[in-house]
Amino acid sequence: MGPQWDRRWMVVRADGGMVTQRDTPRLATVHPHLDNGALRLETDSMEPLDLPVSPAGDPVRVVIHGSDAVGCAVSPDADAWISTVLGADLRLVFMRDEDARATDPAYAEGHRVSFADGFPALLVSERSVEELARRGGREIPVERFRPNIVVTGAHPHDEDQWQRFTLGAMNFSGVKLCTRCKVTTTDQKTGVRDPDREPLRTLALYRRIESAVYFGVNVVHDGPGRISVGDPVEVLERGIIPGAGLVARV
């Protein structure tokens, strides 16, 4: 399911529909931290909120991109806190191990994912971010792409071909190029959208395939393990990694 505790919490509406930065960019101003076995939520306008990392509330039906999933209620205090911050009647839910979703079998059969869009981890290279900044004429923070693995040392977009690779002692597979949306235009400190729609505008000039733009690669891992800052990367197998809707023709 990717890095421990990652994408295990989600904000939902009363009907269980997911709330993300796509429709609520202010969500970027809520900063989660793991501290002494607890999850701390912080934002400029509220006192911090501390929550257990393994809530055991009642099951809650949630909807992720039109598909049903299951979370569990965190607490009334969590619901009240996030509702106040975002100005709507919302809930905070947690995904237990037993409620993990299956990844899309067209790209990664037999793997699991939490509340992430579709895959356990997203890898982005610093060289790719630098190339994007060069083409766009402005710095784009890597946080705009919300990766949970960042690598350096490769050529720009070299990761597009990493079908199998290792990070430290762990084995990974690149399974799908990542389709980018307007979340990338959101300042992750302020929650404000970029008025020039960057970096999507620049990506559309050189990273467009049919109707979508791509940046970074979705990856899965073969089993549990540990990775650390500074771990070496070894590419074991290169090849074409498909984008959305392209798997059938590759």
Image: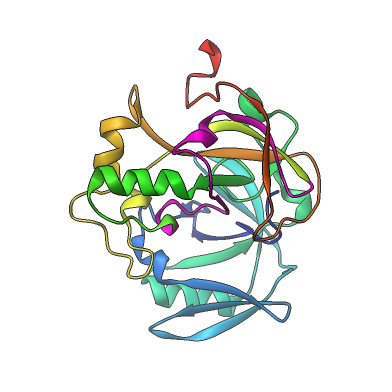
Q: Is residue 127 left or right of residue 76?
A: left
Residue 76, position as x, y percentages in the image = 59, 76
Q: Nearer the viewer, residue 154 or 197?
A: 154
Q: Is residue 32 left or right of residue 157?
A: right
- Which residue, as the protein is rendered here, is positioned at the far top? 249
Asked if residue 217 is among those painted magenta in the image, a careful observer would answer no
Quadrant the C terminus occupies: top right
Residue at position x 69%, y 54% in the image: 231
Residue 190, position as x, y percentages in the image = 32, 70
Q: Nearer the viewer, residue 170 or 55?
A: 170
Which stretch is magenta? 143-169
- Which residue, as the protein is rendered here, is positioned at the far bottom? 47
Residue at position x 33%, y 44% in the image: 132
Residue 234, position as x, y percentages in the image = 68, 39
User: Measured along the vertical axis of the image, is residue 66 above or below residue 11?
Assistant: above
Residue at position x 51%, y 11% in the image: 249
Q: Nearer the viewer, residue 182 or 47?
A: 182
Q: Is residue 83 left or right of residue 94?
A: left
- Which residue, as the protein is rendered here, is positioned at the far left? 195
Picture quadrant of residue 186: bottom left
User: Measured along the vertical axis of the image, is residue 51 above or below residue 201?
Assistant: below
Residue 149, position as x, y percentages in the image = 59, 52
Asked if residue 147 is among those painted magenta in the image, a careful observer would answer yes
The figure's colour scheme reads rainbow
Q: How many marks?
A: 0
